[in-house]
Image (cartoon, rainbow, N blue to C red):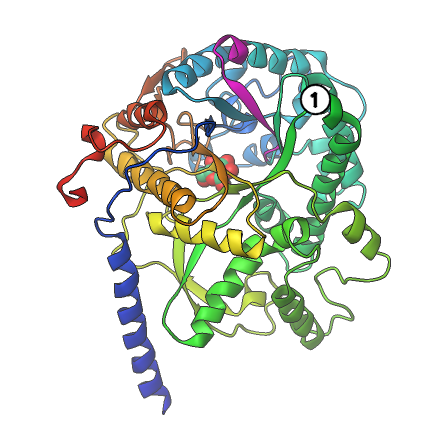
């Protein structure tokens, strides 16, 4: 085939394939059934996105406090300096959670609030804040699910190299020891790291395709050290579980071509397998990552692979520390894309180029308030099946799933559609596909500081009126919808909100 014919043939294939994929999303019938009796229902936030009080009561600055103080970085110059002011208004958050009927609240501890310099001196008011929050949750009969690291590294540690410093795993272990000691009697579910993929790839300075893997390597070590510390010193008395939250999208092959199917699998391995394979799989990086990055590094003139080699010195940590270092796999999932094989320019040294692929969205998919988030509920079920198969059906908790808009309207029908179909796909994964999902967490409890998007992209089940000093939280329609699903522990066909002609 000459080039032009080949391209038209490829486009035709893409159109046919994307038609097939879109068809899957249209009016997908609901499964009316219930979740297992002890299913965990949660909603989530993170410290920097809600707490505010960024410089009070002895808190040290985090990298996000520094980052947002530079002009032009975050939409409309927004910062997390006040956010939802949950440092003072946490009781409002607990009241909102109570009305959702959740069994758990996933929040994160701000590392520099409890250890202003990241290591060393403990800040007692910071400890007290989390103790008070946990006590308020207890009164409301809600269990804490606590993330140790949701991106707000103490600036003092960043100044020493942050996630690129080989000592960072030890710093994290000591921070984890403090948290397990202080809060472990009440916290039975711990998440070590939120989305190490984001930290390694999109962290402010880890961009080039060498630092990315170095940061990733240190993140895995940090997670594993915290896990082993809990296992050896706290588990017997505290009886909790420790996992990690990985963000993994689903990748549909853009066509039936084998090369495109391989590209979609490669995308999954580079995103999910990168962290999941060392911890839940063979103990090493996925072989496709080792192959691709090794080959490219050689062609680019590096004298060793940019991905950490499996050398004799590194084997001990891989063998003893990392494999099996989690009691559950936390999955943050939002969206899917279509993926085709596309060789990249060899001079481009980057994590994206290492993958030799191109991902895009089907224009027929519903969008959201975030450019990267398309509504593809069936992708979640596919992903759960893939994780079941690759990692020997581990216990999984959906640690985040949710949808944004920019309007913040209380009558948020799009979000209801999203939750209905994504949660129903989790139910199908459990009941039909035998996947072991033990919990579901809606992101987010309320509109909050959405990182570089500032306050424009709103993910909340509760609206927050940022123009009022009291920052009132008001339930959106989606909050009532989720409360109903949780109350029913599943989908009842006689609930009007679940019952449309298509399901008959
Ligand atoms: C993060 C959250 C974020 C959400 C929506 C997740 O990747 O953990 O902090 O707000 O996505 O972008």
Q: In this view, does 408 lie to the left or right of 189?
A: left
Residue sitting at 76 percent across and 18 percent down? 122
Is residue 57 shown to the viewer in this render? yes
Placement of the N terminus among the 4 image quadrants:
bottom left
Residue 17 lies in quadrant: bottom left
Q: Is residue 305 above or below residue 101?
A: below
Residue 460 lies in quadrant: top left
351 or 52, nearer to the observer: 351
Whole-percent x, y for residue 426 in the image: 40, 42
Residue sitting at 36 percent across and 26 percent down? 486
Give the farthest residue toward the bottom.
1
Is residue 452 shown to the viewer in this render? no
* Mark 1 residue CB less than 8 A from any atom of ligand 1: no
Assign a secondary structure to mark 1. Answer: helix
5 or 223, nearer to the observer: 223
Residue sitting at 51 percent across and 61 percent down? 267
Q: Is residue 27 left or right of residue 487?
A: left
Q: How crowded is mark 1: few (under 14 residues within 10 Å), some or many (20 or more)?
A: some
Give the farthest residue toward the right.
313
Asked if residue 274 lies in the magenta stretch, the reply is no
39 or 234, nearer to the observer: 39
Placement of the C terminus among the 4 image quadrants:
top left
Whole-percent x, y for residue 296 in the image: 65, 72
Mark 1, residue position:
238
What stretch of residues is rendered in magenta?
136-150
Whole-percent x, y for residue 451 in the image: 49, 36
Residue sitting at 52 percent across and 51 percent down? 388
Whole-percent x, y for residue 206 in the image: 64, 51
Q: Is residue 435 left or right of residue 328?
A: left
Q: In this view, does 302 lie above or below 141?
A: below
């Amino acid at each position: 085939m000459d080039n032009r014919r080949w391209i038209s043939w490829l486009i035709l294939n893409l159109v046919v394939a994307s038609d097939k994929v879109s068809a899957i999303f249209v009016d997908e019938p609901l499964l009316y059934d219930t979740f297992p009796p002890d299913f965990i229902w949660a909603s989530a936030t993170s410290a920097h996105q809600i707490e505010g009080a960024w410089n009070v009561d002895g808190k040290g600055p985090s990298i996000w406090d520094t980052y947002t103080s530079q002009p032009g970085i975050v939409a409309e110059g927004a910062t997390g300096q006040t956010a939802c002011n949950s440092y003072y208004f946490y009781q409002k958050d607990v009241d909102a959670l109570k009305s959702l009927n959740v069994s758990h609240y996933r929040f994160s501890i701000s590392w520099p609030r409890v250890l202003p310099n990241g290591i060393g001196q403990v800040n007692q008011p910071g400890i007290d804040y989390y103790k008070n929050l946990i006590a308020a949750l207890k009164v409301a009969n809600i269990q804490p699910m606590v993330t140790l690291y949701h991106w707000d590294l103490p600036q003092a540690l960043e100044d020493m190299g942050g996630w690129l410093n080989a000592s960072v795993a030890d710093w994290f272990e000591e921070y984890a020891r403090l948290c397990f000691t202080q809060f472990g009697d009440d916290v039975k579910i711990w998440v070590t790291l939120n989305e190490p993929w984001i930290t390694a790839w999109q962290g402010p300075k880890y961009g080039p395709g060498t630092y990315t893997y170095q940061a990733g390597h240190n993140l895995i070590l940090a997670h594993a050290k915290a896990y082993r510390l809990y296992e050896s010193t706290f588990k017997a008395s505290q009886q909790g579980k420790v996992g990690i939250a990985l963000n993994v999208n689903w990748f549909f092959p853009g066509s039936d071509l084998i090369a495109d199917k391989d590209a979609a699998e490669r995308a999954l391995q580079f995103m999910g397998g990168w962290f999941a394979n060392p911890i839940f799989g063979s103990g090493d990086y996925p072989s496709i990552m080792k192959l691709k990055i090794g080959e490219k590094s050689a062609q680019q003139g590096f004298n060793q692979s940019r991905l950490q080699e499996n050398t004799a010195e590194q084997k001990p940590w891989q063998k003893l520390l990392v494999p099996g270092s989690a009691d559950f796999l936390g999955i943050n999932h939002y969206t899917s894309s279509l993926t085709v094989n596309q060789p990249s320019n060899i001079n481009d040294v980057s994590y994206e180029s290492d993958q030799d692929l191109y991902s895009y969205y089907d224009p027929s998919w519903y969008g959201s308030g975030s450019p990267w988030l398309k509504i593809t509920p069936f992708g979640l079920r596919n992903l759960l099946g893939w994780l079941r198969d690759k990692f020997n059906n581990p216990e999984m908790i959906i640690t985040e799933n949710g949808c944004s808009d920019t309007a913040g309207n209380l009558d948020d029908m799009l979000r209801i559609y999203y939750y209905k179909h994504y949660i129903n796909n989790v139910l199908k994964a459990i009941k039909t596909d035998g996947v072991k999902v033990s919990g579901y967490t809606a992101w987010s409890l309320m509109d909050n500081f959405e990182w570089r998007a500032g306050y424009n992209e709103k993910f909340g089940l509760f609206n927050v009126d940022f123009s009022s000093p009291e920052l009132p939280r008001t339930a959106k329609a989606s909050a009532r919808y989720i409360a109903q699903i949780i109350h029913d522990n599943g989908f009842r066909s006689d609930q009007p909100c679940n019952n449309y002609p298509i399901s008959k």
